[in-house]
Amino acid sequence: MTADIYIENNATTFDRKHTFSEDERIYKLIGERRKKMECFFTLLKKKETGNSYTNFSILEQSESFSITEEHEELPENEFDFVVPFRAEKSFKVKAKVRSVTNYLPKPIFD
Amino acid sequence: MEFDWYELCPEDNNSLEQGDLILECPIVIPPGPIEEGDSIEIDVKKINSVVLTQSCDLANDKIEIVLVCQYYPLLYWLDSLPAEQQGKKARKKAIDDLRKGHYAGFHAINKIGPESLLEDYQVVDFRNVYGVNIDLLKKIVLNKGERVRLLPPYREHLSQAFARYFMRVGLPQDLRIEY
Protein backbone atom coordinates (compact mmCIF):
# COMPACT_ATOMS: atom_id res chain seq x y z
CA MET A 1 0.00 0.00 0.00
CA THR A 2 1.41 3.39 -0.90
CA ALA A 3 0.44 6.98 -0.47
CA ASP A 4 1.51 9.30 -3.22
CA ILE A 5 1.90 12.84 -2.06
CA TYR A 6 2.25 15.69 -4.48
CA ILE A 7 3.59 18.85 -2.96
CA GLU A 8 3.21 21.88 -5.10
CA ASN A 9 4.65 25.26 -4.43
CA ASN A 10 2.59 28.18 -5.53
CA ALA A 11 5.43 30.66 -5.68
CA THR A 12 7.72 28.69 -7.97
CA THR A 13 7.46 25.80 -10.33
CA PHE A 14 8.97 23.53 -7.72
CA ASP A 15 7.18 20.22 -7.46
CA ARG A 16 7.96 17.18 -5.42
CA LYS A 17 6.54 13.73 -5.10
CA HIS A 18 7.03 11.49 -2.12
CA THR A 19 6.12 7.84 -2.06
CA PHE A 20 5.75 6.03 1.21
CA SER A 21 5.57 2.30 1.56
CA GLU A 22 3.32 0.59 4.05
CA ASP A 23 6.04 -0.13 6.58
CA GLU A 24 7.60 3.28 6.48
CA ARG A 25 6.58 4.99 9.68
CA ILE A 26 6.12 8.71 9.84
CA TYR A 27 8.20 9.24 12.94
CA LYS A 28 11.23 7.89 11.16
CA LEU A 29 11.08 10.58 8.60
CA ILE A 30 13.71 13.17 9.18
CA GLY A 31 14.27 16.84 8.59
CA GLU A 32 12.20 18.67 6.10
CA ARG A 33 10.36 15.59 4.98
CA ARG A 34 9.14 14.83 8.47
CA LYS A 35 8.14 18.40 9.02
CA LYS A 36 6.08 18.34 5.90
CA MET A 37 4.40 15.11 6.83
CA GLU A 38 3.54 16.42 10.28
CA CYS A 39 2.13 19.49 8.68
CA PHE A 40 0.14 17.33 6.32
CA PHE A 41 -1.32 15.11 9.01
CA THR A 42 -2.18 18.08 11.14
CA LEU A 43 -3.90 19.50 8.14
CA LEU A 44 -5.92 16.38 7.61
CA LYS A 45 -6.93 16.20 11.23
CA LYS A 46 -8.00 19.79 11.31
CA LYS A 47 -9.85 19.32 8.07
CA GLU A 48 -11.66 16.29 9.41
CA THR A 49 -12.81 18.09 12.51
CA GLY A 50 -13.80 21.15 10.53
CA ASN A 51 -11.29 23.39 12.25
CA SER A 52 -8.83 25.73 10.68
CA TYR A 53 -6.16 25.17 8.02
CA THR A 54 -8.46 26.70 5.51
CA ASN A 55 -5.36 28.05 3.79
CA PHE A 56 -4.58 24.52 2.63
CA SER A 57 -6.66 22.41 0.38
CA ILE A 58 -6.95 18.75 -0.38
CA LEU A 59 -7.72 18.59 -4.03
CA GLU A 60 -8.49 14.95 -4.44
CA GLN A 61 -9.12 12.14 -2.05
CA SER A 62 -10.03 8.76 -3.40
CA GLU A 63 -11.49 7.26 -0.24
CA SER A 64 -12.07 8.29 3.32
CA PHE A 65 -9.52 7.33 5.92
CA SER A 66 -8.69 7.92 9.54
CA ILE A 67 -5.55 9.34 11.06
CA THR A 68 -4.15 7.80 14.20
CA GLU A 69 -2.62 9.78 17.01
CA GLU A 70 1.08 10.65 17.07
CA HIS A 71 1.31 10.14 13.32
CA GLU A 72 2.40 6.58 13.85
CA GLU A 73 0.60 4.99 10.98
CA LEU A 74 -0.13 5.84 7.45
CA PRO A 75 -3.68 6.19 6.21
CA GLU A 76 -5.24 2.95 5.17
CA ASN A 77 -6.20 3.94 1.70
CA GLU A 78 -4.42 5.53 -1.17
CA PHE A 79 -4.99 9.20 -1.71
CA ASP A 80 -3.73 12.07 -3.76
CA PHE A 81 -3.65 15.68 -2.75
CA VAL A 82 -1.86 18.91 -3.31
CA VAL A 83 -0.56 21.03 -0.48
CA PRO A 84 0.99 24.43 -1.17
CA PHE A 85 4.11 25.20 0.79
CA ARG A 86 6.32 28.19 1.09
CA ALA A 87 9.10 28.76 -1.38
CA GLU A 88 12.04 26.52 -0.68
CA LYS A 89 14.39 27.76 -3.31
CA SER A 90 15.57 31.32 -3.42
CA PHE A 91 18.50 33.16 -4.83
CA LYS A 92 19.61 36.74 -5.18
CA VAL A 93 20.20 38.64 -8.37
CA LYS A 94 21.64 42.07 -8.99
CA ALA A 95 18.84 44.44 -9.87
CA LYS A 96 18.95 48.00 -11.06
CA VAL A 97 15.85 50.14 -10.72
CA ARG A 98 14.99 51.42 -14.17
CA SER A 99 11.94 53.48 -13.27
CA VAL A 100 9.73 54.41 -10.34
CA THR A 101 6.24 55.62 -11.08
CA ASN A 102 3.21 56.47 -9.01
CA TYR A 103 0.75 54.09 -10.51
CA LEU A 104 -2.95 54.57 -11.12
CA PRO A 105 -4.94 52.06 -13.12
CA LYS A 106 -6.14 53.31 -16.46
CA PRO A 107 -8.73 52.71 -17.65
CA ILE A 108 -10.71 51.58 -14.61
CA PHE A 109 -13.74 50.78 -16.71
CA ASP A 110 -13.41 49.15 -20.10
CA MET B 1 -24.55 53.25 16.60
CA GLU B 2 -21.54 55.01 15.17
CA PHE B 3 -18.05 53.68 15.09
CA ASP B 4 -14.73 55.33 14.42
CA TRP B 5 -13.45 54.48 10.99
CA TYR B 6 -9.75 54.91 11.60
CA GLU B 7 -6.99 55.19 14.10
CA LEU B 8 -3.56 56.63 13.54
CA CYS B 9 -0.57 54.40 14.09
CA PRO B 10 2.53 56.16 15.39
CA GLU B 11 5.52 56.14 13.08
CA ASP B 12 7.57 53.92 15.37
CA ASN B 13 4.93 51.19 15.23
CA ASN B 14 5.63 48.77 12.43
CA SER B 15 3.06 46.17 13.38
CA LEU B 16 0.77 45.28 10.54
CA GLU B 17 -2.93 44.53 10.57
CA GLN B 18 -5.60 43.96 8.01
CA GLY B 19 -6.93 47.33 6.93
CA ASP B 20 -3.64 49.21 7.33
CA LEU B 21 -3.27 51.87 4.68
CA ILE B 22 0.26 52.03 3.34
CA LEU B 23 1.22 54.96 1.20
CA GLU B 24 3.48 54.50 -1.79
CA CYS B 25 3.95 50.79 -1.39
CA PRO B 26 6.53 49.66 -3.97
CA ILE B 27 5.50 46.92 -6.36
CA VAL B 28 8.44 45.48 -8.25
CA ILE B 29 7.85 44.38 -11.83
CA PRO B 30 10.39 41.76 -12.94
CA PRO B 31 11.37 42.09 -16.59
CA GLY B 32 10.83 38.40 -17.33
CA PRO B 33 12.22 35.04 -16.30
CA ILE B 34 15.12 35.42 -13.89
CA GLU B 35 17.99 33.01 -13.43
CA GLU B 36 20.59 32.90 -10.71
CA GLY B 37 23.47 35.25 -11.45
CA ASP B 38 21.42 37.48 -13.72
CA SER B 39 21.76 41.23 -13.63
CA ILE B 40 18.38 42.73 -14.31
CA GLU B 41 16.60 46.04 -14.57
CA ILE B 42 13.33 46.40 -12.73
CA ASP B 43 10.45 48.81 -12.82
CA VAL B 44 8.79 49.89 -9.61
CA LYS B 45 5.18 50.93 -9.31
CA LYS B 46 4.25 52.81 -6.18
CA ILE B 47 0.68 52.39 -5.08
CA ASN B 48 -1.32 53.54 -2.11
CA SER B 49 -2.32 50.19 -0.73
CA VAL B 50 -4.43 48.53 1.92
CA VAL B 51 -3.50 45.28 3.65
CA LEU B 52 -5.90 42.41 2.94
CA THR B 53 -4.12 39.60 4.77
CA GLN B 54 -5.93 38.57 7.94
CA SER B 55 -4.55 40.21 11.09
CA CYS B 56 -4.20 36.89 12.88
CA ASP B 57 -1.94 35.56 10.14
CA LEU B 58 0.15 38.70 10.33
CA ALA B 59 0.39 38.67 14.12
CA ASN B 60 1.43 35.05 14.34
CA ASP B 61 4.04 35.17 11.58
CA LYS B 62 2.04 32.70 9.54
CA ILE B 63 2.91 34.24 6.25
CA GLU B 64 5.85 35.66 4.33
CA ILE B 65 3.89 37.55 1.75
CA VAL B 66 1.36 40.21 2.65
CA LEU B 67 -1.55 40.63 0.30
CA VAL B 68 -2.29 44.24 -0.56
CA CYS B 69 -4.38 46.03 -3.14
CA GLN B 70 -4.60 49.57 -4.34
CA TYR B 71 -6.90 52.36 -3.26
CA TYR B 72 -7.38 55.76 -4.81
CA PRO B 73 -9.64 58.78 -4.31
CA LEU B 74 -13.33 58.44 -5.07
CA LEU B 75 -13.04 61.43 -7.40
CA TYR B 76 -10.55 59.56 -9.57
CA TRP B 77 -12.88 56.58 -9.68
CA LEU B 78 -15.82 58.77 -10.63
CA ASP B 79 -13.88 60.55 -13.34
CA SER B 80 -13.04 57.15 -14.79
CA LEU B 81 -16.66 56.18 -15.24
CA PRO B 82 -17.76 55.79 -18.86
CA ALA B 83 -18.77 58.99 -20.64
CA GLU B 84 -22.47 58.11 -20.49
CA GLN B 85 -22.25 57.95 -16.70
CA GLN B 86 -20.65 61.34 -16.24
CA GLY B 87 -23.90 63.17 -15.68
CA LYS B 88 -24.67 64.39 -12.17
CA LYS B 89 -27.50 61.90 -11.70
CA ALA B 90 -25.51 58.98 -13.09
CA ARG B 91 -22.51 59.79 -10.90
CA LYS B 92 -24.76 59.95 -7.88
CA LYS B 93 -26.22 56.57 -8.75
CA ALA B 94 -22.73 55.14 -9.23
CA ILE B 95 -21.75 56.37 -5.77
CA ASP B 96 -24.86 54.81 -4.29
CA ASP B 97 -24.22 51.51 -6.06
CA LEU B 98 -20.61 51.57 -4.90
CA ARG B 99 -21.68 52.24 -1.33
CA LYS B 100 -24.14 49.36 -1.45
CA GLY B 101 -21.50 46.98 -2.77
CA HIS B 102 -22.97 46.58 -6.23
CA TYR B 103 -19.55 47.03 -7.83
CA ALA B 104 -17.98 43.74 -6.82
CA GLY B 105 -14.43 44.78 -7.66
CA PHE B 106 -14.51 47.97 -5.64
CA HIS B 107 -15.14 48.97 -2.05
CA ALA B 108 -15.66 52.46 -0.70
CA ILE B 109 -14.11 53.66 2.54
CA ASN B 110 -14.59 56.87 4.42
CA LYS B 111 -12.55 60.04 4.38
CA ILE B 112 -11.02 61.64 7.45
CA GLY B 113 -11.30 65.25 6.40
CA PRO B 114 -9.42 68.25 5.08
CA GLU B 115 -5.66 68.41 5.64
CA SER B 116 -5.52 64.83 6.83
CA LEU B 117 -4.06 61.65 5.45
CA LEU B 118 -7.42 60.89 3.85
CA GLU B 119 -8.93 64.06 2.51
CA ASP B 120 -11.36 62.32 0.15
CA TYR B 121 -13.39 59.14 0.24
CA GLN B 122 -11.34 56.28 -1.15
CA VAL B 123 -12.11 53.34 -3.40
CA VAL B 124 -10.33 50.06 -2.79
CA ASP B 125 -9.69 48.23 -6.05
CA PHE B 126 -9.77 44.45 -5.55
CA ARG B 127 -9.14 43.62 -9.19
CA ASN B 128 -5.38 43.62 -8.85
CA VAL B 129 -3.80 42.28 -5.70
CA TYR B 130 -0.10 42.24 -4.95
CA GLY B 131 2.13 40.25 -2.65
CA VAL B 132 4.73 42.15 -0.66
CA ASN B 133 7.34 40.55 1.54
CA ILE B 134 6.35 41.12 5.16
CA ASP B 135 9.82 42.20 6.31
CA LEU B 136 9.99 44.74 3.52
CA LEU B 137 6.56 46.07 4.38
CA LYS B 138 7.51 46.51 8.03
CA LYS B 139 10.58 48.48 7.00
CA ILE B 140 8.51 50.63 4.71
CA VAL B 141 6.03 51.67 7.37
CA LEU B 142 8.65 52.33 10.01
CA ASN B 143 9.56 55.99 10.51
CA LYS B 144 7.45 57.08 7.60
CA GLY B 145 5.15 59.21 9.69
CA GLU B 146 1.77 58.37 11.07
CA ARG B 147 -0.35 55.98 9.06
CA VAL B 148 -4.00 55.19 8.98
CA ARG B 149 -5.52 51.94 10.20
CA LEU B 150 -9.06 50.89 9.37
CA LEU B 151 -11.01 49.93 12.46
CA PRO B 152 -13.73 47.34 13.06
CA PRO B 153 -16.39 46.92 11.85
CA TYR B 154 -15.20 48.63 8.66
CA ARG B 155 -12.16 46.40 8.50
CA GLU B 156 -14.50 43.42 8.41
CA HIS B 157 -16.59 45.16 5.78
CA LEU B 158 -13.45 45.42 3.66
CA SER B 159 -12.55 41.80 4.27
CA GLN B 160 -16.01 40.59 3.44
CA ALA B 161 -16.19 42.68 0.30
CA PHE B 162 -12.89 41.23 -0.88
CA ALA B 163 -14.06 37.70 -0.07
CA ARG B 164 -17.27 38.32 -1.97
CA TYR B 165 -15.29 39.52 -4.97
CA PHE B 166 -12.82 36.67 -4.83
CA MET B 167 -15.35 33.90 -4.41
CA ARG B 168 -17.35 34.79 -7.49
CA VAL B 169 -17.87 31.94 -9.90
CA GLY B 170 -19.42 32.50 -13.26
CA LEU B 171 -22.16 29.90 -13.51
CA PRO B 172 -24.99 29.46 -15.95
CA GLN B 173 -28.31 30.73 -14.72
CA ASP B 174 -30.74 28.63 -16.67
CA LEU B 175 -33.58 28.29 -14.21
CA ARG B 176 -36.84 29.46 -15.69
CA ILE B 177 -39.69 30.01 -13.30
CA GLU B 178 -43.04 29.95 -15.00
CA TYR B 179 -46.31 30.39 -13.22
Image (spheres, coloured by chain):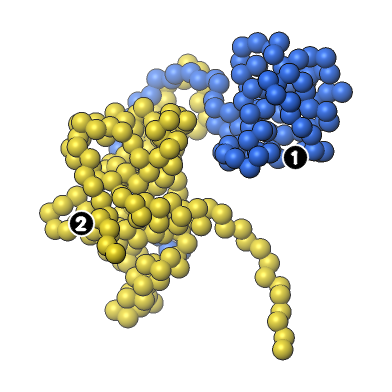
When the figure is inspected, residue B120 is found, relative to residue B93, above or below; the finding is above
Q: What SS does tag 1 mark? A: loop
Callout 2 amino acid: Ile
Q: Residue at x 39, y 59 (%)?
A: B107
Residue B52, picture quadrant:
top left
Name the kind of residue labelled 1 in the image.
Glu
Chain shown yellow: that is B
SS of the residue under disc 2: loop
Chain for colour blue: A
| Chain letter of disc 2 in the image | B
Q: Quadrant of the N terminus of chain A?
A: top right
Instruction: Relative to B111, say whether A64 is above or below.
Output: above
Residue A60 disc label:
1
Rendered position, B80 above or below A19 = below
Residue closest to the eye, B44 or A22:
A22
Identify the residue shown where x is 33% and y is 36%: B16
The chain letter under disc 1 is A
Residue B24: mark: none
Instruction: Mark yes or no: residue B81 visible.
Output: no
Tell me where residue B78 sits by quadrant. Answer: bottom left
Disc 2: which residue: B112
Task: Check if mark 2 and mark 1 are on a common chain.
Answer: no
Q: Nearer the viewer, residue B73 or A58?
A: A58
Q: Hey, which quadrant is residue A7 in on the image? A: top right
Give percent across and percent down for residue B112. Answer: 20, 56
Instruction: Tell me the CA gap for discs 2 and 1.
Output: 48 Å
